[in-house]
């Protein structure tokens, strides 16, 4: 660091963490591009089929730049992505960035509402479970979370679809959204996928919140607070919760990152026009450029949220705030 | 120590699932691809779970589907444990650059969500059972690697490992005769969780149409085949969904019990 300039250690840690994250992102992009190259399978052959003549294969390879060495193509690809050019799709020759634009918005809309609902709910239920530790509210909450953890996302999706949309006809079964739709209509359309995503991440977040608070509850100062006559909820809210914030925020972030995976499956269940549906469709079509671009975006969001989780837990640690 | 009732239920159910998978050919009432009734016939004494989207017996499909699901998950779990624990122990024993390279590589793979990475890989490779087992097993091996390395790092500094080194024993001896027996209990507890993960993973891939391919089917695939009926109020797709959940929960109950036992063995809180 610059001589004479005192850099706050927290700042230094945060910068280090972000730099490390960016490095990781570049490495991940290399895996997604070069690692896939190394796998058996010929893209040109896959497009033209087994009966293609060698000349046609060679032409297509030249057209797609497949005759260039992999490293050169990787640098080219990464450079393109940095400038917003994601390449063109193999299956329908359209610009990937254009196709993604609308879908990314749709997916973020879904994830946003899932996050807004699940985070406060998880923290609240975690507090309740910690307050009644070992008694019936805790047992019910723990039992329900154990079963939702054991269910894959698509099973939760179909259970919700079958009961809420078909049996009781409360909500629409297909999450149709289109441009020009009003906000309320849009919310009504995505309500089922949002419920499913909330259920998927809620359990884990709640368990970890409960564990973090119970961990703090064993400290001596909690006993002091209890002995001076505070009510159990006050002890948790005023004394235990502030010290459990760092692990709770960490868990919340990790689960939001987990939404990335959940969203792929949930979009397929509800036929929602988002990024996940787009990715799965193009894996089936073996459209490698699309799969690589979308895969990298998902990985980047995931890594980004993980970095944020680390940065927040650095910032929330009071021991780092006052350098010796 | 008596086995708690939940663990006993879990053990019996897990056993039943495995027995049904092993003897699928004997207990299934019809052939796997045999069309024996109408489209989505309701439950009857001839078809205990009704029939599926093209009139095949649902119970038969479920039994064979369970066989595929359990086979893939078991093979993938075995693969992940063998590669993960051997590499993890090796990294802990040798240390130095081999440890660095392996650990950073695992960090890198774990930085990408498993499902996304699997989808990227499956977009290039042919989708066959061996490839699926390999992909799920190796992605899962990263978690086993972390656990076994962490456990082995604590063990390698023990006196008896030092003694073995001084005797001039090779890596293989130290890994299999000194470290493995002492690292076994946490690994066994992890085994159940990894198996559940593999079941959920293969089901999800098949559900997305990128796992087990027809004419073979697994539970995730059966959900997909029958999902169109849900909108018309035909709950056939929920049967395999319940089966996945039941298998995962029963293995979970056993794993919880094993985990509790091993922590008490190590002197932790019961």
Image (cartoon, helix red, strand yellow):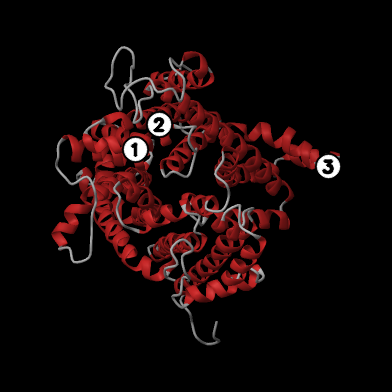
| Residue depth check, mark 2 versus mark 3: number of the one nearer the observer | 2
Residue matched to label 3: B166
The residue at the point 27 percent across, 40 percent down is A129
Whether residue B257 is visible, yes or no, is: no
Q: Is residue A42 left or right of residue A94?
A: right
Residue matched to label 2: B244
* Mark 1 surroundings: few (<14), some (14-19) or many (≥20) residues within 10 A: many
Pick whichever, A143 or B41, lies toward us: B41
Judged from this view, the residue extending furthest toward the top is B45
Which numbered disc, 2 or 3, marks the residue that appears first in the sequence? 3
Check disc 1 and report its element: helix, strand or loop. Answer: helix
- Label 2 and label 3: CA atoms lie apart by 50 Å
The chain holding disc 1 is A
- Label 1 and label 2: CA atoms lie apart by 9 Å
* Image coords of residue B9 (percent x, y): 40, 19
Residue matched to label 1: A155
């Amino acid at each position: 660091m610059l001589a004479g300039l005192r850099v706050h250690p927290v700042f230094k840690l945060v910068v280090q963490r972000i730099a490390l994250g960016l490095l990781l992102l570049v490495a991940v992009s290399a895996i997604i591009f070069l690692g896939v190259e190394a796998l058996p399978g010929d893209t040109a052959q896959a497009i033209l089929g087994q009966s293609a003549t060698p000349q046609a294969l060679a032409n297509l390879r030249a057209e797609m730049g497949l005759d260039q060495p992999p490293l050169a193509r990787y640098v080219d690809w990464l450079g393109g992505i940095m400038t917003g050019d994601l390449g063109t799709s193999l299956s329908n020759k359209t610009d990937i960035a254009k196709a993604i634009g609308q879908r990314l918005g749709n997916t973020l809309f879904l994830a946003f509402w899932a996050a807004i609902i699940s985070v406060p709910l998880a923290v609240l239920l975690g507090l309740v479970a910690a307050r009644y530790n070992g008694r019936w509210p805790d047992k019910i909450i723990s039992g329900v979370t154990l079963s939702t953890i054991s269910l894959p996302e698509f099973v939760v999706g179909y259970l919700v679809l079958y009961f809420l949309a078909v049996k009781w006809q409360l909500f629409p079964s297909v999450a149709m959204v289109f441009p020009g739709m009003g906000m309320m209509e849009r919310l009504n359309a995505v309500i089922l996928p949002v419920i499913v995503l909330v259920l998927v991440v809620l359990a884990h977040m709640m368990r970890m919140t409960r564990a973090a608070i119970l961990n703090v509850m064993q400290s001596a100062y909690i006993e002091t607070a209890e002995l001076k006559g505070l009510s159990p909820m006050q002890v948790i809210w005023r004394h235990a919760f502030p010290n459990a914030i760092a692990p709770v925020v960490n868990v919340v972030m990790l689960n939001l990152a987990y939404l990335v995976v959940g969203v792929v499956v949930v979009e397929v269940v509800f036929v929602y026009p988002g990024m996940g549906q787009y990715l799965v469709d193009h894996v089936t079509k073996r459209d490698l450029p699309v799969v690589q671009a979308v895969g990298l975006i998902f990985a980047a969001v995931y890594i980004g949220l993980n970095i944020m989780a680390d940065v927040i837990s650095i910032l929330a640690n009071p021991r780092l705030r006052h350098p010796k | 120590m008596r086995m708690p009732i939940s663990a006993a239920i879990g053990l019996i159910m897990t056993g039943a699932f495995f027995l049904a998978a092993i003897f699928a050919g004997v207990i299934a009432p019809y052939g796997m691809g045999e069309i024996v009734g109408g489209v989505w016939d309701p439950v009857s004494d001839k078809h205990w779970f009704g029939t599926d989207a093209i009139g095949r017996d649902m119970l038969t499909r479920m039994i064979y589907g369970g066989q595929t699901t359990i086979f893939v998950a078991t093979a993938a779990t075995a693969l992940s444990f063998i590669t993960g624990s051997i590499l993890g122990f090796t990294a802990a024993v040798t240390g130095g650059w081999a440890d660095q390279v392996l650990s950073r590589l695992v960090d890198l793979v774990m930085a990408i969500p498993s499902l996304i990475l699997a989808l990227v890989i499956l977009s290039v490779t042919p989708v066959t059972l061996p490839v699926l087992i390999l992909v799920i097993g190796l992605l899962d091996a990263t978690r086993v690697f972390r656990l076994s390395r962490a456990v082995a790092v604590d063990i390698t500094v023990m006196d008896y490992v030092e003694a073995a080194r001084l005797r001039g024993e090779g890596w293989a001896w130290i890994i299999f005769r000194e470290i493995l027996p002492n690292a076994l209990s946490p690994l066994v507890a992890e085994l159940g969780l990894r198996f559940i993960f593999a079941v959920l993973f293969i089901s999800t891939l098949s559900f997305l149409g990128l796992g087990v391919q027809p004419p073979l089917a697994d539970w995730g695939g059966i959900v997909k085949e029958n999902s169109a009926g849900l909108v018309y109020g035909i709950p056939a797709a929920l049967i395999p969904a319940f089966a996945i959940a039941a298998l995962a929960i029963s293995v979970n109950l056993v794993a919880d019990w094993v985990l509790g036992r091993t922590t008490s063995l190590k002197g932790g809180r019961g």
